[in-house]
Amino acid sequence: MEESQRQKKIGGVLQEDLVDVLQGAATKGGLRGIIISVSKVKVTTDLSVAKVYLSIFPNDKGQALLEGIRSNTPLIRHELAQRTKNQLRRMPNLEFFIDDSLEYIDRIEQSLKGEDNPIENPDLLDKRKKS
């Protein structure tokens, strides 16, 4: 099902403000050399939940940062509510996830460039088992 214009608009507003909030919190917290970007915000049809997909660089610190962000979700939600009080009547609940699409694309690219190319060597693919 396709998102409505309202869902897209709310997602865009939340995405812009979340970048400021998260990047500001990272620099205030003393985290140098870490880039947090909000790649996508999907809002449910009833506008009660916003699923936030984050890209974190470097990748090895992603899971630890995600846990920290999840534990501080009420504070982040409050800050967002303050920023968007003139645009949104109710602030949706926030759910944070790691967006690993860039990593996935990179692995495919490396596979196609390297020795383990499944197109050139089909023996690398798992054989489908018939039950």
Image (cartoon, rainbow, N blue to C red):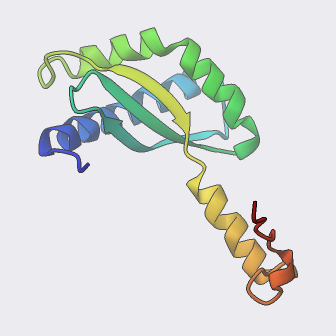
Percent of width and height locating residue 124: 85, 76
Residue 99 located left or right of residue 48: right
Front residue (pair 107, 35):
107
Question: Looking at the picture, does residue 115 appear above or below residue 22?
Answer: below
Question: Looking at the picture, does residue 37 appear above or below residue 84?
Answer: below
**Can you name the residue that lies furthest to the front here?**
131
When asked about the image quadrant of residue 87, the answer is top left
Asked whether residue 29 appears in the rendered view, the answer is: no
Percent of width and height locating residue 57: 65, 45
Residue 10 located left or right of residue 93: left
Residue 69 located left or right of residue 106: left
Asked whether residue 18 appears in the rendered view, the answer is: yes
Percent of width and height locating residue 88: 15, 22
At 29% from the left and 20% from the top, the residue drawn is 92
At 48% from the left and 39% from the top, the residue drawn is 53
At 23% from the left and 26% from the top, the residue drawn is 47
Front residue (pair 118, 97):
118
Percent of width and height locating residue 78: 35, 11
Front residue (pair 29, 116):
116
Residue 116 located left or right of residue 46: right
Question: Looking at the picture, does residue 127 appear above or below residue 20?
Answer: below
